[in-house]
Amino acid sequence: MAGRRRPRTHGAAAQQQQQRRRGGRGRQSLSEAAGFARPEGSEGQEAHGDRVTLAQARRGTPGHRPVRVYADGIFDLFHSGHARALMQAKNLFPNTQLVVGVCSDALTHKYKGNTVMTEDERYEAVRHCRYVDEVVRDAPWTLSPEFLKRHRIDFVAHDDIPYTSAGSQDVYKHIKEAGMFVSTQRTEGISTSDLITRIVRDYDVYVRRNLQRGYTARELNVGFIKEKKYRLQEQVDKMKERVQTLEEKSKHLVHRVEEKSQDLVFKWEEKSRELIASFLELFGPEGPWHVIQERSGRVLQALSPYQSPSSSPTRGRSPSPSAHWPLRFRSPPPRAAGRPGSGGV
């Protein structure tokens, strides 16, 4: 009903209910690292009861009774292959609590070899994986029934390839015979040995890298001669890089100049075509300059009339002023000279 309140649970019941909501995880949240198992064993032996069968685990168990799956390893240079194996172990059953055992440096150096990371670093790397609920420090190399019972282990997860070590053809043989073994898939292409192989193969590259980052030759266990060799090689590589950069820049500059020159030639051709077209349009037979010349010629003809060839080209003289004077001011006409012997007076 809407107004009905749920009864408040206390103690172990509240913890079981919270664990059921989290899907059986033993850790509080993803913001916290997984806890460490106590050397004397895990808590809650009374609530654990008898070990569940594989069929019961696959069907799903109650929230207060998660299936405790154990996975162990060295986990040196913790990588995606480790995380993927733990993810598979965590998702084997609907309600799984993953317990991870990490072997100590003493056991690892004795049976497998030196490690890059210390045991404390490996403990911390594993307990910060999101799939891990509990970490067992100084885990045994081979699992005994007493160890499995003390930590309330239901199943052991590992890849199905026989693991030969410590004089045994398969250290998980007795676990498989007891029906407690659940296989996971191994991630190909990534392992701690592969990572170390890459570092050893490119040793000079990583030494020069750390020298650049400020590590001393003594910290890198590099002698005086080798240090000078790496320093010289670094200078040579820098010079090569500079030369290569200058070559690329010069090629880029030449390419840009070629593009600009082609662009200028193209623009000049276009402009010359436009100028030629404008000139022809202005001074051609049908252009405005020809029309202006024709009109100016017509105007000049209209202002100066046409004269015949018979007329004198010189301008006529204006009449003498005496033609307009009165008769009394005019001089008499000249007398005609008489012939000798005539009777004129």
Image (spheres, grey):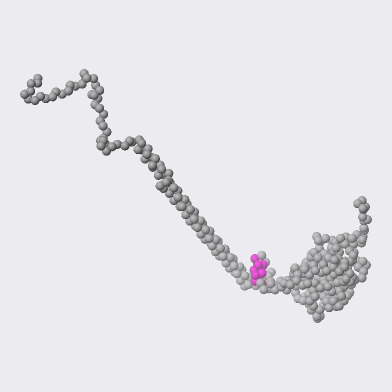
* Residue at left offset 24%, top offset 21%: 325
Residue 270 in the image: state x and y as whole percent: 48, 53
The answer to whether residue 123 is above or below residue 297 is: below
Query: Is residue 161 or residue 118 the one in the foreground?
Result: 161
Expressed as whole percent of the image width and height from the top left, the position of residue 149 reads 89, 72
The secondary structure making up most of the magenta span is helix
Residue 292 part of the magenta segment: no
- Residue 205 magenta-drawn? yes
Q: Nearer the viewer, residue 340 or 2?
A: 340
Where is residue 29, by image quadrant? bottom right
Q: Considering depth in this image, is 88 or 37 the residue closer to the camera?
A: 88
User: Exactly how many numbered labels are in the figure?
Assistant: 0
Can residue 118 be seen at all in this image of the molecule? no
**Relative to 54, is 204 on the left or the right?**
left
Residue sitting nearer the eye, 178 or 40: 178
Residue at (88% x, 62% y) in the render: 20
Whether residue 49 is visible, yes or no, is yes
Image: magenta residue range: 203-212
